[in-house]
Image (cartoon, rainbow, N blue to C red):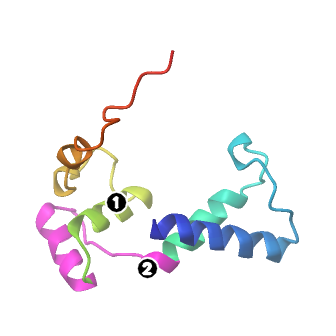
C-alpha cells in the first residue's frame, strides 16, 4: 500500500515536472518511461537503497535488515527490484501468505472464461 501511494505521488510529481497530463495509459507503454521513473523515485522515498556485501547470503540479508530496521523480506525484495539478486534467490526469507488468503471467500480467484 505504501509503495502504491508513493508511486502515485511520484507519478504526479514527475508529470508536473515534465508538464504532462496524467491521463496517459501507462500500461500501453506510451508514457515515455514516466512510470519507470516514478517507480524508481517512489522506491527511494519508501526505502533508501540497501547495501549487502557479496556474496549475498541469508545471514547478510538478516544483518542488513537489522541495520535498516526492516524485515528480511523487504531487503530481499529491494535487492530483487534493484537487479542485485535474481528473482529466484532467497525467496525463503519472504513469508508466505497463502494461509491468510484462504480465509477470503474468493481464494483462489475464479479462472477467467
Mark 1: secondary structure: helix
The span picked out in magenta is: 45-68
Magenta stretch encompasses residue 39: no
Considering depth in this image, is 82 or 97 the residue closer to the camera?
97
Q: Which residue is painted at 46% across and 70% down in the image? A: 2
Q: Is residue 40 left or right of residue 101?
A: right
Q: Disc 2 marks which residue?
A: 48
Query: Residue 85's x, y, as percent?
Result: 33, 55
Mark 2: secondary structure: loop
Total label count?
Answer: 2
Please tell me how crowded label 2 is: few (under 14), some (14-19), or many (20+) other residues with Cα within 10 Å.
few
Q: Which residue is painted at 68% across and 44% down in the image? A: 27
Q: Is residue 28 left or right of residue 85?
A: right
Query: Residue 93's x, y, as percent?
Result: 17, 57
Q: Which mark is residue 77?
A: 1
Tell whether label 2 touches label 1 (CB within 8 Å). no
Considering depth in this image, is 1 or 41 the residue closer to the camera?
1
Q: Is residue 14 left or right of residue 45?
A: right
Instruction: Please identify the residue farthest to the front as the structure is shown.
Output: 105
**Which image quadrant: the N terminus?**
bottom left
Is residue 23 in view? yes
Q: CA distance from mark 1 to mark 2?
A: 13 Å
State which tag comes first along the sequence, 1 or 2.
Answer: 2
Please tell me how crowded label 1 is: few (under 14), some (14-19), or many (20+) other residues with Cα within 10 Å.
some
Amino acid at each position: 500500500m505504501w509503495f502504491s501511494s508513493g508511486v502515485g505521488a511520484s507519478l504526479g510529481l514527475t508529470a508536473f515536472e515534465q508538464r504532462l497530463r496524467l491521463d496517459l495509459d501507462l500500461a500501453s507503454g506510451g508514457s515515455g518511461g514516466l512510470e519507470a521513473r516514478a517507480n524508481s523515485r517512489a522506491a527511494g522515498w519508501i526505502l533508501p537503497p540497501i547495501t549487502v556485501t557479496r556474496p549475498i547470503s541469508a545471514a547478510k540479508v538478516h544483518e542488513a535488515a537489522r541495520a535498516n530496521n526492516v524485515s528480511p523480506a523487504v531487503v530481499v525484495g529491494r535487492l530483487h527490484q534493484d537487479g542485485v539478486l535474481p528473482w529466484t534467490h532467497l525467496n525463503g526469507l519472504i513469508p508466505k501468505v497463502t494461509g491468510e488468503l484462504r480465509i477470503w471467500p474468493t481464494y483462489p480467484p475464479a479462472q477467467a472464461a
